[in-house]
Amino acid sequence: MKTRYKILLMSLLFGLCTAMIGCSSEENNSEPVIPTATPTVAPLNTATPTVKPTNTPRPTNTPKPTNTPTPTFIPEPDPDGEFFNASSALDKKLGAYYAGVLTDAEVSKGNAYRLSKKLDAAKEGAETTVLFLGGSVTEGSNASERTPKGYQKGYAYITFEYLRDTYGFGDGSNFKYVNAGISGTSSALGMNRVEDDVLSFKPDIIFIEFAVNNDSRITYDNKTYESLIRRCLNAEGEPAVVLLFSAATYAGGTQAVMEKIGAFYDLTMISMHNALKTPQNKKAIEWSDFSKDSVHPQQAGHYLYAKAICKTLKHAYEENTSKSYNIPENVSKEGYGDYENLHMINNTNAEGYITDLGCFQTSKTNHATSGNSDSFALEKGWIKRSDAEDKPMVITLECKSFHVVVKQVNAKTDVDFDVYVDGVKTSTITTSKSGAWNNAFAYVVFESDECSEHTIEIKANESSVAANATILSLGYCK
């Protein structure tokens, strides 16, 4: 009996398990649903691009890479590729910064009417004289190449070559080059020699460069600078005037004064100082790449300076819209045009002015860099010998101001002059000076608000009678 119950119970349990397994099998054996859409297959060898989500802000807790500074300047290719020289080590070093250096040199295109007029005439065959007036940088100091005349081939001649080759008629022989640079001289010397060294050549385009030799703290320099600009602008033939500001380790303050004057006259202005001193360009060029001393470009530096000038001239010419140019009637600051009509006296035109030579004699004079340029104005002066009789040079003329240019030497052998106007001592001129190097130096020894006749005496200082001396030129303003 018990055995039957056990068998029955086992049968019931077996049936129950079988039923449960059957249900599970029916569910698992149901047919799965298969998608009917055909997937897109990418073409062979074509990677599917990954699209970054837009407007996704950077997580605020992501630190910036410590060794990757964020650039503040993005160099661009040079739009004027013809100025780039692939064989120039300096150009290649500048690389993508090259265009920025040339662009940053531009201070102002100014009113380019006169420049455009002169270059248009040159293209038609007009005789065109390009003159550079300045100091040692203009003279070409430290340049290793030479011009056909044997002068140092600095920025001035390289700029001339560009103008001749670009705007000249035929072979460009209608272009004439004049270099009126004299080392170590300021606009005071430039103003004193403007008649002989500038206007006598009847220039069509005049470049003026005195930024590294002028001193903005000296009123004489500022007044002669603006007077020189006005004299050139008012010259025969209405020449174009371009202002240049050379670079130096000490330059900057004088350029600020010059820029204001140049802006007043709306002139084209180029600054190599600006080109080299901007923070972005300092990353690409070191001062030693440009110059081996404190001011004079080496040959590669002269080429770079010229390219900066040529780029601004090119754009000033091509973009000019001015139909006329008018010189302002007034000066930018009271007194800054006082020397505009300064006239030079030398040993060829002194008759009627010098009534007694005294202890002086006429001579072919010179200075430290005589023969390095086309300048000749200071070769017609006077010398005093140490054994000459102690008598003053006497000049009688009508004037408002009187100027004397001397040669300074680094020795005790030369005389100091005392200057007397109408019997009254007005100044002392130093020709022996520590650090001098036979350089020319200009003095204004007398000024008055009224133009009247004066008797001027130049005689040796009592402490240095038995000494040599050289007067390079005299000058006066009415």
Image (cartoon, rainbow, N blue to C red):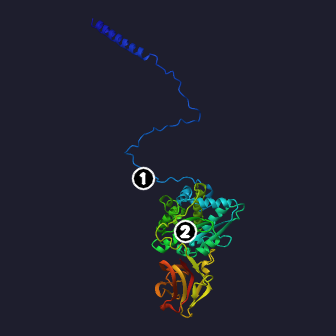
Q: Residues within 10 Å of mark 1 (few under 14, many from 20)?
A: few
Residue 5 sits above or below residue 324 on the image: above
Amino acid carrying label 2: it is: Arg
Residue 433 sits above or below residue 329 on the image: below
Q: Nearer the viewer, residue 106 or 319?
A: 319
Q: Position of residue 376 (x, y in %)?
A: 62, 77
Residue 450 sits above or below residue 383 on the image: above
Q: Position of residue 397 (x, y in %)?
A: 55, 83
Q: How many marks?
A: 2
Q: Position of residue 14 (x, y in %)?
A: 35, 11
Q: Which image quarter holds the N terminus?
A: top left
Q: Secondary structure at mark 1?
A: loop
Amino acid carrying label 1: it is: Thr
Q: Which mark is residue 56?
A: none
Q: Secondary structure at mark 2?
A: helix
Q: Residues within 10 Å of mark 2 (few under 14, many from 20)?
A: many
Q: Nearer the viewer, residue 204 or 308?
A: 204
Q: Is residue 40 left or right of residue 64?
A: right
Task: Name the residue beneath numbered marker 2.
Answer: 230
Q: Nearer the viewer, residue 115 or 34?
A: 115
Whether residue 334 is visible here, answered yes or no, is: yes
Task: Name the residue beneath numbered marker 1.
Answer: 66
Rounded to the nearest whole Å, what is the CA distance between mark 1 and mark 2?
56 Å
Q: Earlier in the sequence, mark 1 or mark 2?
A: 1
Whether residue 297 is visible here, answered yes or no, is: no
> Mark 1–mark 2 contact, CB under 8 Å?
no
Q: Position of residue 120 (x, y in %)?
A: 65, 58
Residue, far right? 170
Residue 194's image quarter? Answer: bottom right
Q: Nearer the viewer, residue 59 or 204?
A: 204
Q: For the point 39% across and 48% down, which residue is it? A: 63
Residue, far top? 1
